[in-house]
Image (cartoon, rainbow, N blue to C red):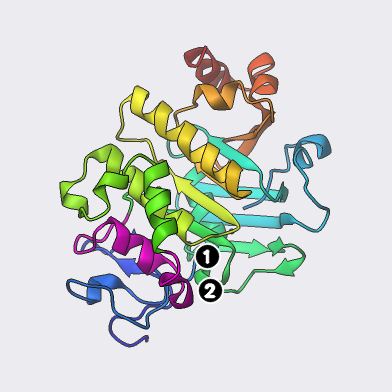
Amino acid sequence: MPAPGRFAIACWGPSGDFSCACLGACPRSVPGRIARGMSTPAFRGVGAPAACSKRDRNRASPGRGSVLEIDDVRVERPGFVLHLARQRLDAGSLLTIVGPSGGGKSTLLRALLGLEPRASVRGLRWKGRDLHGLPPHRRPFAWMPQDLGLWPHLDALEHLAFARSRGARLRAVDEDHELLRQLGIGHRAHARPSSLSAGERQRLAFARVMAQQPQWAVLDEPFSHLDPVLAEELGHAFFAIARERGMGLVLVSHHIGRHQRSSLQADPFWVIENGGVTQCGGWQDIARAPATPWIERFVDLHH
């Protein structure tokens, strides 16, 4: 077992559920201030579905070697099976995963991040390197969980400083201020989560992901407790910053923003229902020819 205060994977909440996105060392064990000398590597894991055509899988390829691939992922539990195969996602892709509740979206993220103990994953590769068997903190992902996992005793700047590797902290203060400013919370740099609004907490959680400088940002239902106007605003900001930094994005959400529906880049979508991918492609492709009754209803709601 790791020593108290240091985690191989992450922090766990009082209910026993996974609670926050810290790795390497947990600031919940460090009252008041950041513990010097502790490092917090980024999370790292996702690919594209068997239902996708080769054209869809290669839609945004910056280089043949910069590809996240998975040959097979399977999760079985009583009454439910998630199974996806032959998946591929090019570096820098901004992927949105949608589907009915309970269909397997969050389970897929956890399986590929290395956080799902019941998962059987084979052939998970990033840039040709096999990731299977690597601990979560050595995979090319930074994760924003549904509950955000913010640390109550750290202010906004301290969240970003803790997320960075030790060597980057001292030279990154100005960059952290700029990142908070870009996300509209520059004036809240010294505020703790309890004094932030729901939207400000979402922005801080995303800023912490960006501070880790991962190859992929993985966001699980980041807009679930926000009104549609704020969700639209934050979604646009998240996509714009990821695109500006050349970072891949994997987003599970029931909210599809105008920027996603009208994107000139034709950002990819996957639809996951009943444990499998039922359709994938750009939004316009899906809207023109929805493959299932659920997708047809979902498209109608976003027109």
**Residue 295 position within the rendered picture, expressed as x and y whole percent measured from the top left:** 57, 22
The residue that appears at 41% across and 34% down in the rendered structure is 234
First-in-chain label (1 vs 2):
1
Amino acid type of the residue tagged 2 in the rendering: Pro
Magenta region includes residue 151: yes
The residue that appears at 32% across and 81% down in the rendered structure is 36
Do tag 1 and tag 2 residues touch (Cβ < 8 Å)?
yes
| Of the pair 198 and 47, the residue shown nearer to us | 198
**Residue 158 position within the rendered picture, expressed as x and y whole percent measured from the top left:** 30, 64
Quarter of the image for residue 240 reads: top right
- Secondary structure under tag 1 reads loop
Res. 4 visible in picture: yes
Which stretch did the figure color magenta?
149-172
The N terminus sits in image quarter: bottom left
Indicate left or right for 266 with 296 as reference: right
Q: Is residue 17 above or below residue 252?
A: below
Q: What residue is shown with label 1?
A: 114
Q: What residue is shown with label 2?
A: 135
